[in-house]
Amino acid sequence: MSTLKVQNIQHTNGTSGIAISSGGVITQPTIPCCMVQLTTSNAQDTSNPYTTTSTDIRFDKILLNQGGCYSESTGRFTVPIDGVYEINCQFLSNANSATDKQFSLRKNGAAVQLGYHGVDNQHVEMHVHALLDCVSGDYLTIQLEQGEIFIDGGGTYSAFTVRLVG
């Protein structure tokens, strides 16, 4: 049995890829990922509820954008390297809507997963979760297909997260 004793693993250009602490904790500081939220200050639809359908939602509150993969101006997470990506999105449906609510996770413009809530005049959380095999240059977006979603000034009722998992 062999033991490899290292503290950091780096690319030949000096970029650190993996670090191991003295306690054995492994970190990967450059994993492409983002967490963004939609607020009433967004560039598309500042009303509450948000009603803009059939266009990529431009989440405006960026909490994390490691690798600079998410673009607020387009609403796209552009995949920087091939791999499997975990995507999660949540919204709060609008309670006063008389229509069904549906949103889609899209890969390169095509819907791959849907979140849905029927008419019942209550706020209900809607979710989409997916693991997608992606190649460099693919892009991931979210679109409201129908209905209304509740948003606020802080973005606390919405989230779109993407991260490379392997």
Image (cartoon, rainbow, N blue to C red):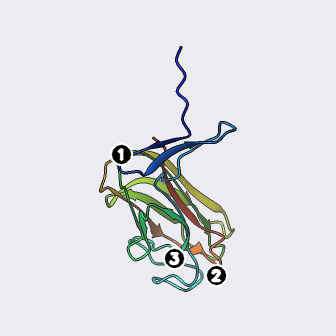
- Residue 116 picture location, percent across and down: 54, 58
Residue at horizontal 39 percent and vertical 45 percent from the top: 11
Tag 2's secondary structure? loop
Residue in the foreground of this view, choosing between 92 and 2: 2
Q: CA distance from mark 1 to mark 3?
A: 36 Å
Q: Secondary structure at mark 3?
A: loop
Which residue, given by chain and number where applicable, does mark 2 sit on?
A: 153
Q: Position of residue 70 (x, y in %)?
A: 43, 66
**Is 77 located above or below residue 166 in the figure?**
below
Camera-near label (1 vs 3) is 1
Q: Where is mark 1, residue-wise? A: 12
Sequence order check, earlier mark of 1 and 3: 1
The residue nearer to you, when weighing 80 against 9, is: 9
Question: Which residue is at 38% across, 73% downward?
Answer: 74
Q: Which image quadrant for residue 108?
A: bottom left
- Residue 147 horizontal/vertical position (percent): 52, 71
N-terminal of the pair, mark 2 or mark 1, is 1
What residue do we see at 61% from left, 76% from top? 151
Instruction: Give, as a three-letter code, the residue at label 2.
Output: Gly
* Label 3 Cα crowd, 10 Å radius (few <14 / some 14-19 / many 20+): many
Give the image quarter of residue 83: top left
**Who comes first in sequence, dot 2 or dot 3?**
3
Give above or below for 100 relative to 45: above
Q: In the rendered image, which residue does mark 3 sit on?
A: 60
Amino acid residing under circle 3:
Asp
Q: Kindly check if marks 1 and 3 are in contact, taking CB atoms under 8 A apart as contact.
A: no
The local crowd at label 2, few if under 14, some if 14 to 19, many if 20 or more residues have their Cα within 10 Å, is some
* Crowdedness near tag 1: few (<14), some (14–19) or many (≥20) residues, C-alpha within 10 Å: few
Determine the residue located farthest toward the top in the rendered image.
1
